[in-house]
Image (tube, rainbow, N blue to C red):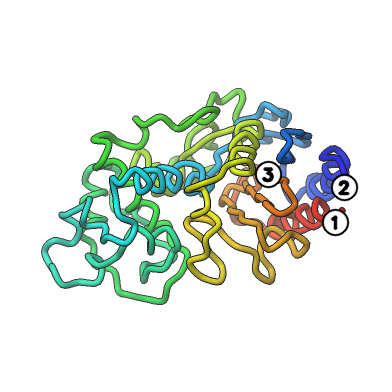
Amino acid sequence: MTSVATKLDSAFVHLEAAIQSGRIPGGVLGIVDSSGNRAVRAIGQAQTTPTARPMTEETWFDLASLTKVIFTNERILALAEAGRIDLDAPLISIIPDYRHYNLDNWERKITFRQCLGHQTPYPAVFPLYTYGRDPDLLRTFLLQHEFPAGPAVYSDINFILLGIALERIAGKWIRDMDPGPGFAWSADQMTAAATEDCYWRHRVLVGEVHDDNCSALQGAGNAGLFGTVSSVLDFAFGKLVAAGPEALIRTALSSRRTHGWELPYEGWSGGELNSKETIGHTGFTGTGIWIDFERGHAWTLLTNRVHPTRHFDSGILPLRRAVGDAINAF
């Protein structure tokens, strides 16, 4: 059986090439197998402007949409397992005031399971942060906003709404909830990978959430989680050895999605050589996690590809695919 260190050596050359070409400032690659063996390596810069800092294996990353699968999805499925929510019930079973001025609209029929699988008519992108900075008012605005129904696409709105449901059940905001072992809702500026030089916050973001809507909401179910390569690998290892209700994260809701996660399809981020028993998810800041249950290993590629700007072709998709194929080539 090929060691995780050998797999890391094979995949790391692609990350190294991306750094050397100037496409990405820095990154950390980590692999773990179902026996608990792991290998990790860092390269490049955690920050380049206004000061430079090296990337290390201890660097904290804004995990962006990995928040969906590591935090929000986990808690929704746990509540379902405990009988606190019914995945096939509409969101209004927990959020009764959702679009309550029109009791017959489609939004009031949307279920938890549909949100988990991005099987809803919400738009792919909605700049909620442009409507203000009052987090209470923004939540209220979102719950009463009338969206035109479109085709089912991947939409942050699904997980923002799931996050609001978690807040209603817990009686507190997400940022006041336990983010889980090894994770946090912010990070020290001296140990965090920098993200964007934000045009509306007027600073380079370091240790604070990059996602615009999550920032304005002061915490949301779609983004905001920070972690290190170690904490992400710990989470992935837990999935590799888990059983029972964990099966839902592997249960398909469509050809491309399970409950919260992506499945392999032609051109997906995990490459072409993973088994069909693989799930994964990516984050806009340049993060990603993939778990191959058949091969018994998982990997995470954490980068700061939006530093200092998102408006640049970082080549993150081909990098992710090349890394995945290198790991699975053995």
Task: Count residues near mark 1 (Cα–Cα under 10 Å), then give few for <14, some for 14-19, many for 20+.
Answer: few
Task: Count residues near mark 2 (Cα–Cα under 10 Å), then give few for <14, some for 14-19, many for 20+.
Answer: some
Q: Which residue does the numbered mark 2 point to in the structure image?
A: 10
> Residue 190: percent from the left, percent from the top?
60, 23
SS under mark 3 = strand
SS under mark 2 = helix
Identify the residue shown where x is 53% and y is 56%. 261
Give the mark nearer the N terminus: 3 vs 2.
2
Q: Which residue does the numbered mark 3 point to in the structure image?
A: 300
In space, the residues marked 1 and 2 are separated at their CA atoms by 9 Å
User: Compared to 35, does 320 lie above or below?
Assistant: below
Q: In which quarter of the image is residue 99?
A: bottom left
**88 or 136, nearer to the observer:** 88
Quadrant containing the N terminus is top right
- Answer left or right for 166 relative to 268: left
Q: Point out the residue furthest to the front here.
A: 244
- Answer left or right for 193 relative to 128: right
> Residue 41: percent from the left, percent from the top?
78, 34
In space, the residues marked 3 and 2 are separated at their CA atoms by 14 Å
Task: Count residues near mark 3 (Cα–Cα under 10 Å), then give few for <14, some for 14-19, many for 20+.
Answer: many
Q: Which residue does the numbered mark 1 point to in the structure image?
A: 329
